[in-house]
Amino acid sequence: MSTKALLDAAMKLKPEERLTLVEGLIQSLDEPDKRLDEIWAEESEKRLKAYREGKLEGIPMEEIFK
């Protein structure tokens, strides 16, 4: 079913049914992606290792918030 067909069907629902549908869709967008968390954790470890090995310079917090 196409997005337009889904929208057309949703528009035929009662207002409270549409609200339930919208709330469900919004909730589904708020679910964390565990794979994304893993990717960021790996990247953080790589950056920390590079910093400790002197391959990456730190930036003072004061400069970041200027």
Image (spheres, rainbow, N blue to C red):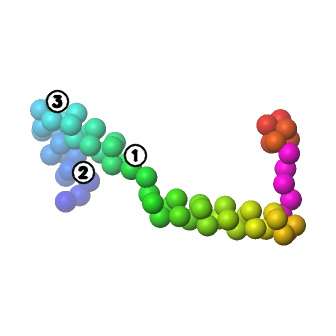
Question: Within 10 angstroms of label 3, few (less than 14), some, or many (20 or more) residues?
Answer: few
Q: Kindly indicate the quadrant of the structure image that contains residue 48.
A: bottom right
**Range of the magenta residues?**
55-60
Give the x, y percent position of residue 44.
67, 61
Residue 23 drawn at (x, y percent): 28, 38
Q: Which amino acid does label 1 sit on?
A: Asp
- Residue 64 on image: x %, y %: 80, 42
Q: What residue type is labelled 3?
A: Pro
Q: Which of marks 1 and 2 is in front?
A: 1
Identify the secondary structure beneath mark 1: loop
Provide the secondary structure element on which disc 3 rests: helix
Residue at image position (26%, 43%) is 24
* Label at residue 4: 2
Q: Which residue is drawn at 16% across and 30% down?
A: 16
Identify whether 45 is placed above or below 24: below
The answer to which of 32 and 8 lies nearer the viewer is 32
Q: Where the C terminus falls, by quadrant?
A: top right
Q: Mark 3 points at which residue?
A: 15
- Is residue 55 found left or right of 37 in the rendered image? right
Which residue is labeled 1 in the image? 30
Q: Residue at x 33, y 43 (%)?
A: 27
**On the picture, is 55 further left or further right than 10?**
right
- Earlier in the chain: of badge 3 and badge 1, it is 3
Is the N terminus in the top left, top right, bottom left or bottom right quadrant?
bottom left
